[in-house]
Image (tube, grey):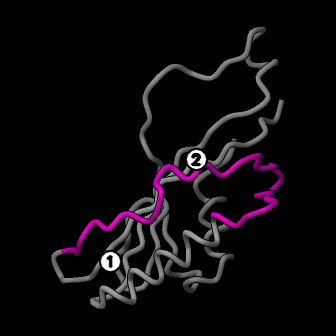
Amino acid sequence: MLALKDIRQYISGLEIVADDNVYIGKLDNKKQKSIGVYSRPISGPANIAIGGLECTTYDTKPVSLLIHWSKSKDETEKTAYNLFEKLRSVSSLTIGDIHINYLRLMVPEPQDVGSDDTGVYEYVIWLDFIYERNR
């Protein structure tokens, strides 16, 4: 299973922001210049191959990345696009001992979601990590 904590570590390793400012779950006190890694709900049928789980070779982890950056729209947008480009240009990826077959970006570009109550601008990137199942 590909866990959020492992994806958090991968995002931290991209060195866009300090490790302490990459979160899973809830952004503590909404520190500026932070990235939140969240599970994204999906619907539809389970992906199970004919023959059952022992014949199913891959699984999908849907994720939402929240770029909670600064009161500068320009700076926030540049950071979001920097992260998006890093994700888009991945050519090989293993997280922990799990081989990632495919990063499927679910949006054509980072999505502007405006600012929070304190005026800090935010962008969201939705993506799916499609990975080899440990059987």
Name the residue tied to disc 2. 128
- Percent coordinates x, y for residue 130 in the rendering: 68, 43
- Percent coordinates x, y for residue 69 in the rendering: 38, 82
- Considering depth in this image, is 125 or 135 the residue closer to the camera? 125
Left or right: where does residue 105 sit relative to residue 97?
left
Dot 2 falls on a residue whose secondary structure is strand
The part of the image, by quadrant, that contains residue 111 is bottom left
- Give me the residue at 28% from left, 66% from top: 113
- Considering depth in this image, is 118 or 23 the residue closer to the camera? 118
User: What is the CA distance from the residue labelled 1 to the residue labelled 2?
Assistant: 25 Å
- Give me the residue at 63% from left, 59% from top: 7
User: Which mark is in front, 1 or 2?
Assistant: 2
Dot 1 falls on a residue whose secondary structure is helix
- Give me the residue at 71% from left, 48% from top: 102
Amino acid under disc 2: Asp
Q: Which residues are magenta?
A: 88-116
Q: Quadrant of the N terminus?
A: top right
- Percent coordinates x, y for residue 66 in the rendering: 41, 66
Height in image: 131 above or below 71? above
Amino acid under disc 1: Lys
The part of the image, by quadrant, that contains residue 76 is bottom left
Q: Are marks 1 and 2 in contact (CB under 8 Å)?
A: no
Q: Give the crowd class for mark 1: few <14, some 14-19, many >=20 residues within 10 Å.
A: some
Name the residue tied to disc 1. 30
The part of the image, by quadrant, that contains residue 27 is bottom left
Q: Is residue 80 magenta?
A: no
Q: How many marks?
A: 2
- Give me the residue at 68% from left, 34% from top: 59
> Please, which residue is most extreme toward the left here?
117
The answer to which of marks 1 and 2 sits earlier in the sequence is 1
- Percent coordinates x, y for residue 110 in the rendering: 43, 66
> Please, which residue is most extreme toward the top here?
51
